[in-house]
Amino acid sequence: MLQGRSLIGPDDFSVAELDRLFELTACIKDDAGYLRQSCRGKLLAALFFEPSTRTRLSFEAAMLRLGGGVCGFAEPGSSSASKGESLADTIRVVSSYSDVIVMRNPKEGSALLASRYSSVPVINAGDGGHHHPTQTLTDLVTIKHLRGDFSRLTIGFCGDLKFGRTVHSLASALSRYVNVKMVFISPGELKIPEYITQTVLGKNNIEYTETDRLEKVISDLDVLYMTRVQRERFLNEEEYIRLKDSYILTAKLMKRARDKLIVLHPLPRVNEISVEVDNDPRAAYFKQAEYGMYIRMALLASIMGVV
Ligand code: NCD
């Protein structure tokens, strides 16, 4: 079904295709031997033009666990981009060396462009402040495993909703499920872009509210999705410093939340979740990162057509 397909945006796969990926992820998580060696002889090219820990390493670990190989770079300064090579030329060449390309790039739209020049599937590992669909797969599978399904879900997104690509992708993906409510919690300067509220949520009739006060809404939430203020996307460092500690989730604030709240964060965390919250059973962000590797195994095996 997903064989040979690229993943550029959060809606590229149907809800049924996502369900299949979630099932595969559960099998992989429960059985360490499942799909091992299924990608033997396949090569993943990981092209990271921006910093990454989890996304790059979980993709590499996923391909290695499937028995495939990995090549690429984690530092654009070591690639010919630093000599002025166009992305189109880099992709044309790398796609002749590999079976699938995973790319993170600071330019919005770069993944779509790459997919047009590539002879192999391209997976978007983050294109600027736009989208990050494999983080969304990770987020969805974590909610699915911890909660069972997405129906009647009230999710709060908190922090930098303007530049946070993980928020844009997850809000878009969740808008395809019924009875999902969204609460957007941010300072006025970092509000969710209108293309998400007007186009994506509006089109799907998703009920949403916007506020700048986390403490006022935390008790209404089933899932709280915390995010870092995206320093690298600010044009003005002073503005970043002024906004960076807008929200800090503390043990005290958690006392107001439901017993069944699920706290997610794509990571890296800076200050927005106090470390004392890590021991709260409702904190699921490290488990979420682990799921990220399992679902990337499911994704790669599916795209490679070995499952
Ligand atoms: C996120 C990203 O790169 O957008 N990180 C990740 O992939 N887990 C979130 C972030 O950097 O804040």
Image (cartoon, helix red, strand yellow):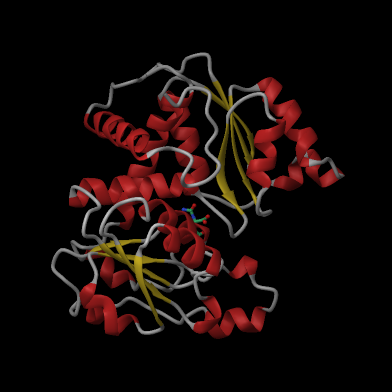
Residue 151 visible? The answer is yes
Residue 48 in view of the camera: no
Q: Position of residue 254 (x, y in %)?
A: 22, 75
Q: Name the residue located 68 percent from the left edge and 21 percent from the top edge.
A: 97
- Residue 36 vs 102, above or below: the answer is above
Question: Residue 122: x percent and y percent?
Answer: 59, 34
- Which quadrant: the C terminus? top left
Give left or right: position of 108 versus 168. Answer: right
Q: Nearer the viewer, residue 199 or 106?
A: 199
Residue beneath the point at 51% across and 78% down: 244
Quadrant hosting residue 269 = bottom left
Say whether residue 10 is left or right of residue 288. right
Above or below 226: residue 31: above
**Quadrant of the drawing holding the N terminus:** top left
x, y (%) of residue 94? 70, 28
20 or 194, nearer to the observer: 194
User: In the displayed image of the protein, which residue is found farthest to the right?
Assistant: 83
Q: How far across and how far down the image is residue 286, in percent?
A: 32, 53
| Quarter where residue 87 is shown | top right
At x 40% / y 38%, what residue is drawn? 14
Residue projecting furthest to the left:
259
- Frontmost residue, 195 versus 93: 195
Q: How many marks?
A: 0
Please determine whether, in this image, residue 204 is positioned above or below residue 292.
below
